[in-house]
């Protein structure tokens, strides 16, 4: 029971400090990234090679795209645990359509062209995200629970569609006019893999959405103080539904990219990737309580996680240690901020008495 | 002056700052054992802050607390309890999901062989409720009790703790007059046992009836101090208000009153927090507000004014009745649609319901009218900036720029931001709940001047206040509410402060009891 709302507010610090703090967190994430780069480049001369940087950034990109969707949800004080499963489901849907989808009752099989495949896969992701949004915003189910349920539902569907197997015939058939899935979605324009381009595009588009549209302003407002936002006329329910739909959209995009990248639609694809996305958002200085966070910070967070993991692989650290170290980095990243907050509060009390 | 050894608790030179606002300025306060000390003061005078400091909920920015002559630092309510200090909160601090018994014994161990001794707890609960002359089953969940009974439970909890200092912050706001009589009987018993009681109430006469010593706070300072036997209501009122207010004369808005903007018809609103019974917080409330008119609603705590404002804003439903805006029924509209239709809302709690703490002054200002800057999906930052700067100038916000954090502003300037934000939506009527709560005297005047300016341009204004002087000085019509009903409608020029107070204390048996 919080008998003392004012005190709690005080302990969060004034806004001026908070803003500076957000800035420091971002800087700190950048410093962490620099340390990771320096550390691994000293231990391995491969680390800074162009081809390795591109490879690592491609890994980062997949997580970063998910993290951008996750950022929207966390900005509103929510959480989306279902994105990893939606990656798997959309990927499988894409694979299923490329294999040929039987049309019920007609005995015929449809072979949609790759753009139709893309659109349908994205719609599947948006739909599941939108369902998350309805559960959270309309039925008031806690985001953690609603999206946890959707995590299992979406994964279950993915396995049902493939019957637990993997779709590997994704090349299409020139006679059916559905070729080009791999050449298009695993393309390398200017020698840089498509996921990186998509990451850049998403980062730009979502930055504009957050900073230049009414939706963006509403999101920051309702994440900061939903009561006040609602009383000011912000359609908080609508915003809440849309962010989950957008998160589902981001996950679906990753699903298609992943499938093309692997040249296979695997129902287990994307498992646990929601956790990496959350980690990226948090390391990037976004408050889980909502209202504060940026695309820029989230991207830095994704790079920290991605480069760390790939660097550990590169220098030959065992898989078990990789996970332990990743976990420790996440905790330290957040703990440092909290420790600083406690120290500042202590100092304030000391100077007051 | 009291003898040293009988002083149970004392605050010496206590100050408390919340950001830029000074809630208490080097205040000295003491309460004697076996006496009831009443603390008077308007809203925002610092009464609750003082009590929170004595009860360990807040820590003073400077100054010392002495309990029975010993200097102490009370860092939490638990530490306060260990020192024998108990508080009955103004806002209920009960867990609605738990039973009466569990609430009364919350935070205390009463073990037998390592397990909770429920039988004993129930017995104690039954006894204390009997003392309070209420028949409530100790196993009833608190959420199933009406507000008045919840307050009884809150009081019962304090009574089961053998405290030496008992602080009562508005203990009677939801009680019926018979319940108040019972409470007073108990207070007299406690006095006889030597408990020091600190009593806060807006019901001035009631407070004078029960207390021995009166202290008046104004703007964070103790301004008067007397034995209750030597004073009367007028002494209290004049000390509470001070000079500054008396000199102000009523300013009536010049323009002829236009058509009806807002019509409230036969409204009933259910009391909140009760799952089972059908009790009304507001009953048979009808009122219309004309263009260019400023109407105030005055009432004491628990009169139903907050419930009325919440329902008018669209946050709560009418159990009965309708709301018309320029003749159109808006009863069913959501908060957002009401704002779009031309109703501006200024909530009571700025921090909780008004401001987005993470946003700048400018973003807070433009939030309600943000859509008007959107062209083809994107915001036109230039027009937004212009509007914000214009608003900062119009509502006279003192800030070094629109990009400053909202928390860098004083309470008064924050309130101007909330007000300015609503002005930017070009409302037809503005509904304000305690528009000057917790802001200093100067800013109060400015807020009302702004409302007056707008009213002269045709805006209808309806505001709720718990300060009579505000109603008298700034409105064209005063509606007094008591226990959920309108108990009088007055013109400020032909009514006295005493008449308003009398109307606010009208007791309607049966409404709450």
Image (tube, rainbow, N blue to C red):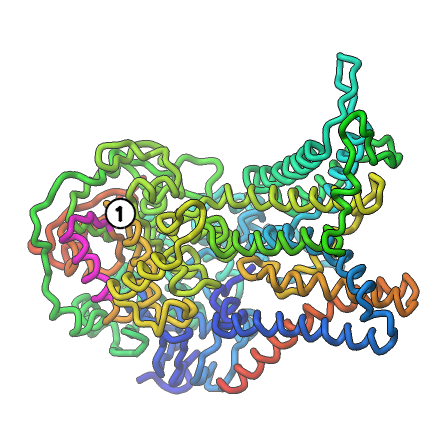
Relative to A208, A146 lies left or right: right
The one of B150 and A104 positioned closer to us in this rendering: A104
Residue drawn where x is 45% and y is 57% of the image: B155
**From the image, which quarter does the C terminus of chain B lie in?**
top left
The one of A141 and A248 positioned closer to us in this rendering: A248
The one of B435 and B163 positioned closer to us in this rendering: B435
Does B326 appear above or below B33? above
Q: Which residues are magenta?
A: B444-462
Residue ID for mark 1? B427
Residue B109 occupies which quadrant of the picture? Answer: bottom right
Which secondary structure class fits the magenta region best? helix
Residue drawn where x is 70% and y is 39% of the image: A150
Q: Is disc 1 placed on a helix, strand or loop?
A: loop
The one of A53 and B48 positioned closer to us in this rendering: A53
Residue B335 occupies which quadrant of the picture? Answer: top left
Residue B451 in the magenta stretch? The answer is: yes
Relative to B337, B60 lies left or right: right
Residue B182 visible (yes or no): yes
Residue B193 visible (yes or no): no
Q: Position of residue A320 (x, y in %)?
A: 90, 62
Residue drawn where x is 25% and y is 52% of the image: B463
Q: Position of residue B322 (x, y in %)?
A: 29, 33
Residue A10 in the magenta stretch? The answer is: no
Near mark 1 (Cα within 10 A), the count class, few <14, some 14-19 or many ≥20, is: many
Q: Position of residue B174 (x, y in %)?
A: 37, 50
Relative to B293, B75 lies left or right: right
In this rendering, the count of numbered labels is 1
**From the image, which quarter does the N terminus of chain B lie in?**
bottom left
Q: Position of residue A348 (x, y in %)?
A: 53, 82
């Amino acid at each position: 029971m919080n008998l003392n709302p004012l005190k709690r507010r005080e302990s969060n610090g004034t806004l001026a400090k908070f803003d500076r703090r957000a800035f420091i967190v971002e800087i700190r994430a950048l410093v962490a990234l620099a340390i990771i780069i320096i550390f691994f480049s000293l231990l391995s001369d491969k680390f800074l090679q162009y081809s390795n940087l591109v490879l690592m950034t491609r890994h980062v990109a997949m997580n970063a795209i998910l993290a951008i969707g996750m950022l929207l949800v966390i900005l509103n004080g929510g959480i989306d645990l279902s994105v990893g499963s939606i990656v798997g489901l959309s990927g499988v849907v894409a694979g299923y359509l490329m294999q040929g989808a039987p049309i019920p009752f007609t005995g015929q099989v449809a072979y949609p062209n790759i753009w139709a495949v893309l659109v349908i896969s994205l719609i599947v992701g948006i739909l599941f995200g939108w369902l998350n949004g309805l559960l959270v915003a309309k039925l008031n189910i806690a985001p953690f629970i609603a999206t946890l349920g959707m995590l299992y539902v979406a994964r279950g569907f993915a396995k049902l569609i493939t019957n637990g197997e993997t779709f590997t015939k994704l090349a299409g058939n020139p006679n059916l006019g559905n070729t080009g899935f791999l050449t298009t979605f695993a393309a390398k324009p200017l020698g840089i893999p498509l996921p990186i381009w998509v990451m850049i595009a998403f980062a730009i588009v979502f930055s504009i959405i957050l900073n230049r549209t009414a939706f963006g302003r509403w999101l920051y407002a309702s994440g900061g103080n939903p009561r006040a936002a609602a009383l000011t006329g912000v359609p908080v329910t609508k915003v809440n539904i849309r962010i989950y739909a957008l998160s589902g959209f981001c996950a679906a995009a990753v699903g298609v990219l992943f499938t093309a990248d692997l040249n296979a639609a695997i129902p287990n694809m994307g498992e646990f990737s929601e956790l990496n996305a959350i980690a990226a958002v948090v390391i990037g200085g976004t408050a889980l309580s909502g209202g504060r966070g940026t695309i820029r910070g989230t991207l830095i967070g994704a790079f920290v996680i991605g480069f760390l993991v790939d660097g550990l692989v590169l220098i030959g650290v065992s898989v078990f240690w990789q996970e332990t170290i990743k976990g420790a980095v996440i905790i330290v990243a957040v703990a440092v901020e909290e420790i600083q907050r406690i120290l500042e509060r202590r100092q304030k009390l000391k100077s007051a008495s | 002056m009291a003898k040293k050894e009988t002083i149970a608790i004392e605050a010496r030179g206590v100050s408390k700052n919340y950001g830029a606002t000074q809630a208490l300025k080097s205040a000295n306060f003491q309460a004697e054992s076996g006496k009831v000390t009443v603390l008077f003061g308007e809203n925002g005078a610092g009464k609750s802050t003082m009590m929170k400091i004595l009860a360990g909920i807040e820590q003073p920015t400077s100054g010392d607390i002495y309990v029975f002559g010993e200097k102490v630092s009370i860092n939490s309510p638990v530490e306060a309890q260990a020192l024998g200090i108990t508080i009955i909160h103004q806002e209920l601090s009960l867990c609605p999901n738990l039973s009466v018994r569990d609430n009364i014994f919350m935070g205390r161990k009463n073990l037998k062989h390592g397990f909770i001794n429920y039988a004993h707890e129930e017995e104690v609960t039954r006894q204390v409720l009997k003392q309070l002359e209420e028949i409530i089953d100790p196993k009833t969940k608190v959420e199933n009790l009406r507000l008045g009974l919840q307050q009884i439970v809150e009081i019962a909890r304090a009574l089961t703790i053998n405290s030496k200092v008992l602080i009562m912050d508005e203990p009677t706001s939801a009680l019926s007059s018979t319940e108040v009589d019972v409470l007073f009987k108990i207070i007299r018993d406690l006095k006889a046992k030597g408990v020091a009681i600190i009593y806060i109430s807006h019901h001035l006469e009631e407070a004078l009836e029960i207390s021995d010593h009166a202290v008046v706070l104004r703007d964070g300072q103790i301004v008067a101090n007397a034995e209750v036997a030597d004073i009367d209501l007028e002494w209290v009122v004049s000390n509470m208000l001070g000079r500054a207010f008396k000199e102000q004369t009523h300013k009536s808005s010049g323009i002829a009153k236009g058509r009806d903007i807002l019509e409230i018809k036969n409204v009933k609103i259910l009391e909140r927090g009760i799952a089972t019974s059908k009790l009304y917080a507001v009953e048979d409330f009808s009122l219309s507000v004309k263009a260019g008119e400023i109407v105030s609603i005055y009432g004491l705590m628990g009169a139903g004014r907050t419930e009325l404002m919440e329902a008018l804003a669209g946050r709560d439903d009418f159990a009965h009745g309708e709301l018309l805006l320029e003749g159109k029924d808006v009863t069913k509209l959501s908060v957002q649609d009401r704002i779009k239709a031309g109703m501006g809302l200024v909530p009571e709690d700025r921090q909780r319901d008004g401001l987005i703490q993470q946003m700048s002054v400018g973003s807070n200002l433009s939030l309600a009218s943000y859509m008007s800057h959107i062209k083809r999906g994107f915001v036109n930052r230039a027009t937004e900036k212009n509007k914000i700067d214009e608003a900062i100038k119009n509502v006279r916000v003192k800030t070094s720029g629109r990009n400053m954090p909202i928390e860098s502003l004083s309470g008064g300037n924050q309130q101007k931001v909330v007000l300015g934000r609503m002005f930017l939506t070009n409302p037809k009527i503005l509904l304000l709940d305690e528009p000057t709560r917790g802001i200093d005297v100067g800013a109060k005047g400015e807020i009302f001047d702004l409302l007056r300016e707008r009213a002269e341009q045709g805006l209808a204004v309806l505001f709720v206040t718990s300060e009579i002087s505000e109603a008298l000085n700034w409105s064209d019509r005063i509606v007094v509410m008591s226990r959920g009903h309108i108990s009088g409608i007055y013109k400020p020029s032909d009514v006295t402060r005493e008449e308003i107070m009398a109307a606010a204390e009208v007791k309607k048996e049966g409404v709450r009891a």
